[in-house]
Amino acid sequence: MRRSSAVALAVVAGLVVATGAWLLLNRGSADESGPVAMDRRLPALSAPALDGTVASTALLRGKVGVVNVWATWCAPCRREQPALARLARRYGDRVAFLGINYRDERAGARRWVGDEFDVPYPSLFDPSGRTAVQLDFPALPDTYLVDASGTIRWWVLGEASEQELSRLIDQLLAEGSPSA
């Protein structure tokens, strides 16, 4: 019994190391902390929104965008949500925000965006997780900053600070829309 537990632990540890190495090799360059630079096309995502309409990444077309994957059961998501809502209000029409509610129940997620945090942007409802998986994200929360051409330029794994997101958004706005 002990031998099988040790083997299982070794396999899990190997998977964790392999996943970390894969992320570093396939995500871009990063310093020890902070966002990871990327140069990857944002996939076309479309799903029912929490309000019952259909929403998609087409909302970001031609604008700097912020895509945040979140869930009501995710403690870091809860801590960062007020900052995301403030940023969406501050940048207004200059920046498009889109949430992806990952593997949640609709009623709880609707309370989150309405009553709890008054989120001013749509969130795709993704109870199966199939939509968010198209971003290849490893954990929650996960935030992607997209330039006006639809390229993911920054990826922030884990809880993002308001200051960090604001700096990255300002940088993308200052760069303008790259020529196609």
Image: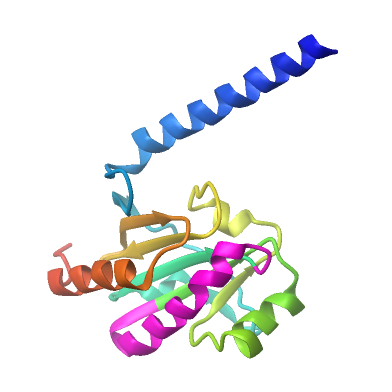
In magenta segment, residue 126: no
Residue 101 in picture, x, y percent from top left:
61, 68
Is 124 located above or below residue 30 in the figure?
below
Residue 79 in picture, x, y percent from top left:
53, 70
Q: What residue is at 31 percent from the left and 85 percent from the top?
A: 91
Q: What residue is at 35 percent from the left and 72 percent from the top?
A: 65
In magenta segment, residue 87: yes
Q: How many numbered marks are there?
A: 0
Q: Which colour scheme is used?
A: rainbow
8 relative position to 82: left or right: right
Residue 169 in picture, x, y percent from top left:
27, 71
Residue 86 in picture, x, y percent from top left:
41, 84
Residue 99 is at least partly visible in this image: no
**Extreme residue in the top direction:** 3
Q: Give the range drawn in magenta.
A: 72-96
The N terminus, quarter of image: top right
Residue 19 is at least partly visible in this image: yes
Is 2 located above or below residue 108 in the figure?
above
The C terminus, quarter of image: bottom left
